[in-house]
Amino acid sequence: MNNVSALGRASDSVRTDRTSSGKEHFEVLDGLRGSAAFLIVIFHLFNYSFGWDTSLSLVRHAYLAVDFFFGLSGFVVAYAYDDRWTRMSVLQFFRIRLIRLHPLVLLGATLGLLGYIFDPFGKAINHTPAPMLLLAYLTSLLLLPSPPVGGRSGETQAINAPAWSLMQEYLGNIAYALILRRLRAITLGIIFVLSGLLLIWVANTRGSLDGGWGYSVIWMAPLRLTVSFVMGLWLYRIQDRIRRPKIGLLALSIVLVVVFQMPKFPNVGGFSLNGLYDVACVLLLFPVIILCGAHSEAGTGMIRLCKFSGKLSYPLYITHIPFVYVVANFASTRHPGTSVLLGWILLVLPFAIAVAWLALKYWDEPVRAWLTRRYSTKRTNV
């Protein structure tokens, strides 16, 4: 009897998060999304500040976190919506996804603009005519490719660089609603294999999969999206046919750290080992991690961390880049010593996390709740 009561209290103290349709979240996958977002922040802070080929170029393969996000998104979208199309229209799906994603797009663009204008170390390079800067901000609010601005090296989302992957996320959701949801698992598997073969060729030719964020290689963005997003949809459809070991958040997060921290590999005999390593992670390792995480339980000791990490992942990813540019511009203009620059990074990292938490609690969650209530009220009135 005491054990039953204890279990009841434990379950009350850690409530199960649910999707808008009432389904339970994948706890470990939520935690892994947070781990990957944190590693992206580390990747940007250290590589933008110290350079891309130094001993302090940490987690130098962490750009692959974007492919991991795309795969997670495909898997979770299929789980959340595959069985809802008999009672949900395409327009309703788009509204749900916009409510989920766009409030933070607006905030990320605004923080990016403020960071660009008020960066105390970027005044020497952040020169853009006001009309062009306003146009870049407006296109960022709409998640459209922006005109180039000074000091941003050709990013397609010049005001808030990480938003390039959110633009692809939107395209993936549109493709899912209009086409991909109707396809059988075998068709999704064929698309995954064919696009994966093209990805292998691209990775070997270019030497890495770090592309899609800038105009010079913008064509890589839809390719990376197609491979991983379709892979996620396909994995969800076939998961019951695959034996899946249960591995928790800590072990899988360590795997991500090790994978992202590997060095840059050389070319051997006309083959890019670095590019082939990248594509092996995307095509082979990430599907295994997603399947293992989807069928693992966080446990009472880790569930709070998984929930917190999952909720913070998107705000952290979409709001951190202005603070990265401040540190990077400080490094390039003041040329501080290594210890001073490390001190700045150690100050900015928790600050960026705190900003992400504030964005979650005082912007994202309240705005999404208000939009959801308003949408539900409209449906009731109709």
Image (spheres, rainbow, N blue to C red):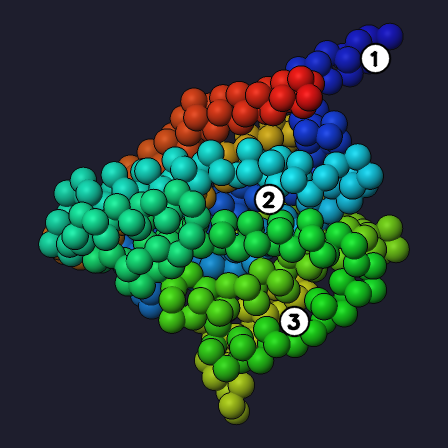
Q: Which residue is mark 3?
A: 195
| Residue at image coords 21%, 58% | 150
Residue 294, x across and y down, in percent: 73, 44
Q: Which residue is mark 2?
A: 32
Task: Tell me if residue 329 can be seen.
Answer: no
Number of residues whose C-alpha sits closer than 10 Å to that of mark 3, classed few (under 14), some (14–19) or many (20 or more): many
Q: Which mark is residue 192?
A: none
Closer to the camera: disc 2 or disc 1? 2
Name the element at disc 3: helix
Corner quadrant of residue 276: bottom right
Q: In the displayed structure, would residue 185 be above or below residue 357?
A: below
User: What type is the residue that disc 1 sits on?
Assistant: Val
Number of residues whose C-alpha sits closer than 10 Å to that of mark 1, classed few (under 14), some (14–19) or many (20 or more): few
Q: Which mark is residue 4?
A: 1
In contact (CB < 8 Å): disc 2 and disc 1: no
Q: In the displayed structure, would residue 205 be above or below residue 179?
A: below
| Residue at image coords 49%, 45% | 37
Separation of marks 3 and 2 at Cα, in angstroms: 25 Å
Most extreme residue toward the bottom is 269
User: What type is the residue that disc 2 sits on?
Assistant: Leu
Residue 277, x across and y down, in percent: 56, 71
- For the N terminus, the quadrant is top right
Name the element at disc 1: helix
Please report whichever mark, 3 or 2, sits nearer to the chain's N-terminal start: 2
The answer to whether residue 276 is left or right of residue 80 is: left
As rendered, which of 351 and 298 lies closer to the eye? Answer: 351
